[in-house]
Image: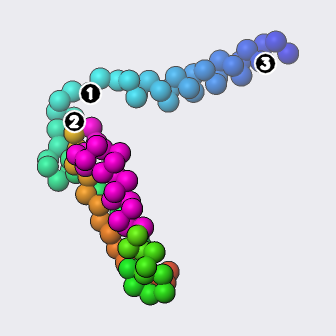
Amino acid sequence: MFKKSMFVTAVVLLMVMALTVPTFANTTPATTARTNQEDTLKIGVLADHSGLLQLYGFEQSQGFELGLEYATNGTMEVAGRPIEVIIRDNASDIDTSN
């Protein structure tokens, strides 16, 4: 019984190490080089800008953008990468959302 529990513990420990070690691995500048377009974080928001719930859709998208401004202290950047918010209208209908 003791050997089985030690084996299970060792397997779990190895799995945890296999998942966490790449997180701390050093990357060379060549692998982290990006173009300006790749640096931009694009966040998509589907909101009801037309249809029955359009009043709430405008508040939702404006609240989301204000929340991002607050979270980034007005810079709209995370880790030096600018944030671009893309808002699309779903017209209060799942079938016609774009």
Relative placement, left or right, of 56 versus 27 is right
Inter-mark Cα distance, 3 to 1: 38 Å
Q: Which residue is mark 2?
A: 32
- Name the chief secondary structure element in magenta: helix
Q: Nearer the viewer, mark 3 or mark 1?
A: 1
Q: Which residue is mark 1?
A: 27
Tell me the element at label 3.
helix
Report the amino acid beneath label 2. Thr
Residue 89 image offset from top left, x and y in percent: 37, 78
Residue drawn at the location 60% of the way across and 20% of the way down: 13
Tell me the element at label 2.
helix
The residue nearer to you, when weighing 59 against 37, is 59
**Is residue 61 part of the magenta span, yes or no?**
yes
Relative placement, left or right, of 4 versus 53 is right
Q: Quadrant of residue 25?
A: top left
Residue drawn at the location 49% of the way across and 87% of the way down: 52
**CB atoms of marks 2 and 1 within 8 Å:** yes
Q: Which residues are magenta?
A: 60-79
Q: Reading the chain from its start, which is encountered first: label 3 or label 1?
A: 3
In the current view of this chain or complex, which residue is farthest to the right? 1
Q: Which residue is mark 3?
A: 4
